[in-house]
Image (cartoon, helix red, strand yellow):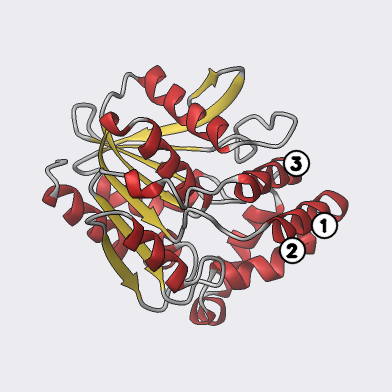
Amino acid sequence: MPFTRIGGVVLHYRLCGPEAAPVVALANSLGTDARIWDAVIAPLARDYRVLSYDKRGHGLSDTPDGDYTLDQHVGDLSGLLDHLGIERLALAGVSVGGLIAQGFALTAPERLAALVLCDTAPKVGDAALWNGRMDLVRAQGLGAIADGIMERWFSPAFRQHQPEALAGWRNMLLRADPKGYAATCATLRDSDLTDAIGAIGTPTLVVAGDEDQATPLELVRACAQAIAGARFEVLAGVGHIPSLEQPEALAALMRDFFKEVGHG
């Protein structure tokens, strides 16, 4: 398990696939770690060099003090890419990982061959929502929100028919660092790229689960409509994290899109 220190923050990352292949980087959602991408990495790594990592406050990466800004998250990713000598890549992110991906696309467009935004938007929720969640998690821990989060993450069919997987992903959330979770809630509270994402010129694929209760379908559709030429795809029967419910379908969409735009 490789680690590096970027701007004083230790980040855990993973690389899979042929060393000389085109690069795909993956950014995870709030309360998760790089493992949510495993079933997508498996098919992609046959033809791509795939980078996944735990953003600050999550997984095996450091949890610095204070609220986290979008610029800090984008800087972590940029620094990690620099450390690994990756100059050009396709970048995919889900939820707050998608917000990080939008920020990176606006900051370093010359490095991107393609952008994939899953179940995300330029602005998610409002200050009251995020402040309330931060206060609750800091006071009572992640157990206080776990059941509600599972309803937002997963479709009713997944929750009904895959109870063991549901329990496992709930365990991942419960074992996350409440401090890092709350600090990243601040990222979502304070970030609004609504007026900026129209400047994204990178070829973009936007993917939404039609049963997502965290970033509803129309919110994600509006994100796609704000980016000129973006392709919008809906995965039926999927909640907030398509890499966990329909990884094969997501990987196929990504692979086809990358080939279409000339990345691999």
Q: Mark 2 Cα within 10 Å, few/some/many (few <14, many 20+)?
A: some
Q: Position of residue 128 (x, y in %)?
A: 74, 59
Alpha carbon distance from label 1 to label 2: 8 Å
Residue at which label 3 appears: 179
Residue at 75 percent across and 30 percent down: it is 65
Q: Secondary structure at mark 2?
A: loop
The three-letter amino acid code for the residue at tag 3 is Lys
> Label 2 near label 1: C-beta < 8 Å?
yes
Q: Position of residue 136 (x, y in %)?
A: 82, 57
Q: Which residue is mark 2?
A: 145
Disc 1/disc 3 C-alpha distance (Å): 11 Å
Q: Of the residues shown, which amino acid type is indicated by label 2?
A: Ile
Instruction: Specify whether residue 179 is in view.
Output: yes
Q: Is residue 247 visible?
A: no
Quarter containing the C terminus: top left
Residue type at the position of mark 1: Leu
The residue to which callout 1 is attached is 136
Mark 1 crowd level (few <14, some 14–19, many ≥20, 10 Å Cα):
some
